[in-house]
Amino acid sequence: MTLRLDVIWKEWLQFALGLGNTVWLCAVSMLLSLLLGVLFVVPLMSRRRYVRAVARTAVDSGRCIPFLLLTYLVYYALPSLGLSLDKWTAALITLVIYNTAYMAEILRAAWVHLPPGQTEAGRAFGYTGIRLFRRIILPQVLIAVGPVVGNQLIQLIKDSAFLSIITLPELTYAANSVQSFYFVPFESFLVATLLYWGLCGAVEYLVQRGERLAAMVRRGHGH
Amino acid sequence: MATDPVPAVELRGLVKQFGGHEVLVSIDLAVMPGETVCIVGPSGSGKSTLLRCINWLERPDRGSVFLHGVRVGYRRSDGGNVLMSDPELAMLRTRVGMVFQHFNLWPHMTALGNVIESPIHVLGRPRGEAVAEGERLLEKVGLADKRDVYPAFLSGGQMQRVAIARALAMRPEVLLFDEATSALDPELVGEVLAVMKDLAREGRTMIVVTHEMKFAREAASRVVFLDNGRIVEIAPAEVFFEKPASERARQFLERYR
Amino acid sequence: MLKWSTMLDLLRGAGMTVTVSCLAIAAGVPLGLLLALARTRRARGLRWLSAVYSSFVRAAPVVTFTMLIFFGLPALGVSLDPLPAAVIALTLNTAAFNAEIWRAAIMDFPRGQLEAALAMGMTGSVAFRRIVFPQIWRASLPALVNEMTLLIKASPAVAIIGVVDLTRKARQIAATTYEPLPPFVAAAVVYGLALALLVAGARTLERSLRRRYGTL
């Protein structure tokens, strides 16, 4: 049995475009959901029980739904409520909603596990409320969550493959196109999987570099 | 000669290295049945390593270990280099009981469960017999009422006494104690030493690595002083503590006056 | 809202999701343990193979991997029906993650207890069976259950090779009734309930274990 990798090589552009779409979709979604996650983590940590409960339910529900189902809900069901979306917008919105729930929880866990030293020092210097959050707590949390965010990004990249089902031209869709046209399913999906493997490796590498940077920063603060 | 008694444990020319550093340098020792030998010395002198070589938890780099004349770790006693198989070594280890510094009880079993585990699953004793003996041993160490308690709910001293009962349940020929009281809070040390003193009085063969000089003085028949991987002095207990022969031993004992 | 017949239809899809997930979990948890044990063997080839497998499969999206298994294996001579292919794909995927979970527990295991077992005359395999495994499965329970929830959430991937699971069933109903909202919301509720039940069940088990043994 011969591997027809020549076909794959011939269609390298499709794979590259698919990979590119996967990368920018996930990167943009991660950034947006990080921002939204920061907004959501505040009610999650609120001292008011009612606020906390509502936020908690929203986050837990967000983490309970399969990504494909959420995609269907956004792409097929929202039009019946009057909001019709093209698949790119639907994809982005789904990725952001889905990931924000996870980011909120990740940020919350990191906040809870912060060593109290720096926050106490901040309070001692008169920082309160939003300023305390923005200038003291948030930077610490962001530095602490590096590796976990990296893992979540990998999860996001993998979930993005579901978008091929609504014919969004990301990497898995590209692989499926090529294989159905040339009848090279094994080679096509193998190459796609290898590309995902490489992408995950790249993310892990970035996380490691980030960790080293964070360690230097931490040392500077006298930990 | 035919009438010479066979040592319970014999070490000949034992050498052990860790990463280029020689922890044991040519150890020769013979422990006779019924003796209580205490091994003392400064930290890092290799006491624990020596003990762990006896049941091959550490494999010596050179030299031989003998248990009642049987060579440990290798198939024949004549010095050949065919390693024992895992099951053979395991069976040989059942003849040596060991009590660890950090107790090493199995937390998912009760006190009695810990004691009867190996007799049933390694020695193949029937459950009824193992339970009866286990209960007797727990009573002997003063913990009959803790038979159904899990280790997480026992104090350090209680855990160590269960560990002693566990070792005794195997009916070993030799008992090894690796700093058995070093990890205990001071007020719990006494109850464990009391059990150990009883065992010594019963005439069991015991090799005890310890920092408790008072215990060594009272319970040991001989004391081995180890320093930097070498046996510097071996003497009967009274001699060692009253009139140590070597300068190093004298310096060491100064700390405990 | 939803007609009764539609609800039943939806439940049929739910049944397929449950079947596929349960089979994959039942096979994937022990397979993960075997893979983790392979990493502890002295044979370097076996260790390397297990590590590469684990890294590769964990990086693969379930959708892509499922298509690789279903469409790709026939090219190597193995022809599969959609359902077995789906179960195999999910099993291989979850086994890779479980392998990491088991491996962490095995490496974290207190050496002292193992030494005591060896000193008592147990061989390595007896010690694993009687001492190590009973403790690591309890310690790994939260992580293993978490992976099970991730598997259930990834299970809609099987729809792409023709297995009509809950998500695909909801999509079918939406396409035929032109009322997309009810079936999707109903499906979401069913998934939510299933996951909530799984997590609650696991939490209860953990609590009773903690009460019995103290903290292992």
Image (cartoon, coloured by chain):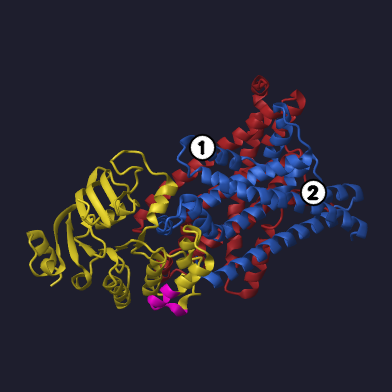
Chain colours: A red, B yellow, C blue
> x, y (%) of residue B59?
32, 47
Q: Nearer the viewer, residue B184 or B98?
A: B98
Residue lying farthest front? B2
Please determine whether, in this image, residue B254 is positioned above or below residue A24: below
Task: Determine the residue positioned at 28% across, 54% down.
Answer: B49
* Image: magenta residue range: B136-145
- Tell me if residue B143 is in the magenta stretch: yes
Image-quadrant location for residue B249? bottom left
Residue bearing mark 2: C165
Secondary structure predominantly adopted by residues drawn in magenta: helix
> x, y (%) of residue C84?
75, 41
Q: Nearer the viewer, residue B164 or C164?
A: B164
Local SS, label 1: helix
> x, y (%) of residue C94?
63, 47
Residue bearing mark 1: C46
Query: Numbered disc 1: what chain?
Result: C
| Residue B247 left/right relative to C1 | left
Q: Residues within 10 Å of mark 2 (few under 14, many from 20)?
A: many
Badge 1 and badge 2 in a common chain: yes
Q: Which mark is residue B72?
A: none
Q: Amino acid at mark 2?
A: Asp
Residue A87 is at least partly visible in this image = no
